Image: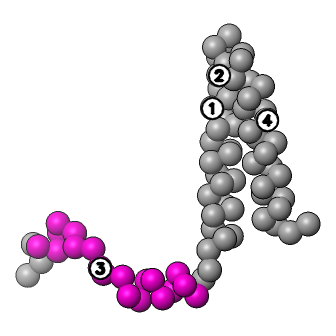
Amino acid sequence: MDKKQQIKKQIEQKELQIKKLHLHRNSSDVCNQLYNTLILEKAILKKNLEELNKNPIIENIKKVFSKREKLICDYFKS
């Protein structure tokens, strides 16, 4: 099983745990904290999956051709 499939499976497991905890979320601080932790872990897994799906060649091309953002400090440089 490749890394993408593992991450997708972990995301599904987190979603199932979140659904189970959602019912008991307001009953105690521990449940609420666990619920928040699961939401955060799921977001991290989704970000990791997104990073794996990126094509490094296309990302490099985007960097080369993208416009540089102007920062406010750029206006004050001598």
Name the chief secondary structure element in magenta. Answer: helix
Residue depicted at x 68% and y 44% = 41
Q: Give the class, few, some or many, for how many residues have Cα within 10 Å of label 4's Cα (few <14, many ≥20).
A: few
Which of the two labelled residues, at mark 4 and mark 2, occupies the earlier sequence position? 4
> Crowding near pointer 2: few (<14 within 10 Å), some, many (20+)?
some
Segment colored magenta: 57-75
Quadrant in the picture for residue 21:
top right
Q: Look at the numbered discs 3 and 1 and tell me whether their residues touch, using CB distance below 8 Å.
A: no
Q: What mark, if any, has residue 68 been given in the picture?
A: 3
Q: Find out whether the residues at labels 1 and 4 contact each other: C-beta distance under 8 Å.
A: no
Q: Secondary structure at mark 4?
A: helix
Cα separation between marks 4 and 2: 16 Å
- The reply to whether dot 1 and dot 2 touch (C-beta < 8 Å) is yes
Q: Amino acid at mark 2?
A: Asn
> What numbered label is drawn on residue 16?
4
The image position of residue 16, as x and y in percent, is: 79, 35
The residue under label 2 is 32
| Tag 1 secondary structure | helix
Q: Badge 3: how crowded within 10 Å, few (<14), some, or many (20+)? A: few
**What residue did someone put label 1 on?**
36
Task: Tell me, yes or no, whether the highlighted magenta stretch contains residue 20.
Answer: no
Task: Tell me: residue 26, above or below residue 18.
Answer: above
